[in-house]
Image (cartoon, rainbow, N blue to C red):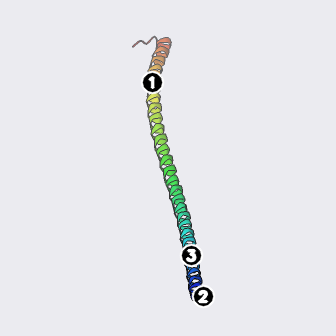
Amino acid sequence: MASEVAEALKQIRACEEEARRIVSEARERAAKIVKDAEEEAERMKKRAREEERRLAEEIFQRFVREAEEEKERFLASARKDAEALKERARKNEEEAIEAVLEVLFGFKK
């Protein structure tokens, strides 16, 4: 009977050792899973920051292009208005010269 008790105690100790080993392995695996998850979260954050920078640059460049296009439209309109004003000024100048010639010399076109 004593040998049966000793054998039972041996088996209990072996089971305890196996349980400790299993718990230790489970802790190691859990720590690795947490570490891997944290590393993946950092990689995802980095990719998100890079994408954010890329999108910000893309938006900035689009606004620069749109501003340049708006400037060109404004300048074209201003040039057109300036030409119209020049033409009116030339016409007014001609009319003024004719009026002066008429008054001074009685010269009428």
Q: How many marks?
A: 3
Dot in front, 2 or 1: 2
Question: Hey, what amino acid is under mark 3?
Answer: Ala
Q: Where is residue 24? Give x, y as percent.
A: 58, 75
Distance between the alpha carbons at the discs numbered 2 and 1: 130 Å
Looking at the image, do the residues carrying marks 1 and 3 touch, with CB atoms under 8 Å apart? Answer: no
Distance between the alpha carbons at the discs numbered 1 and 3: 105 Å
Q: Where is residue 28? Give x, y as percent.
A: 56, 73
Dot in front, 2 or 3: 2
| Rendered view: 71 above or below 103 | below
Dot in front, 1 or 3: 3
> What crowding class fits label 1: few (fewer than 14 Cα within 10 Å), some (14-19), or many (20 or more)?
few
| Rendered view: 44 above or below 67 | below
Q: Where is the C terminus found, in terms of image quarters?
A: top left
Mark 3: which secondary structure?
helix
| Disc assigned to residue 2 | 2
Question: Hey, what amino acid is under mark 2?
Answer: Ala
Q: Which residue is mark 1?
A: 90
Question: Hey, what amino acid is under mark 1?
Answer: Arg
Distance between the alpha carbons at the discs numbered 2 and 3: 25 Å
| Disc assigned to residue 19 | 3
Q: Residue at x 43, y 13 (%)?
A: 107
Earlier residue among tags 1 and 3 = 3
Mark 1: which secondary structure?
helix
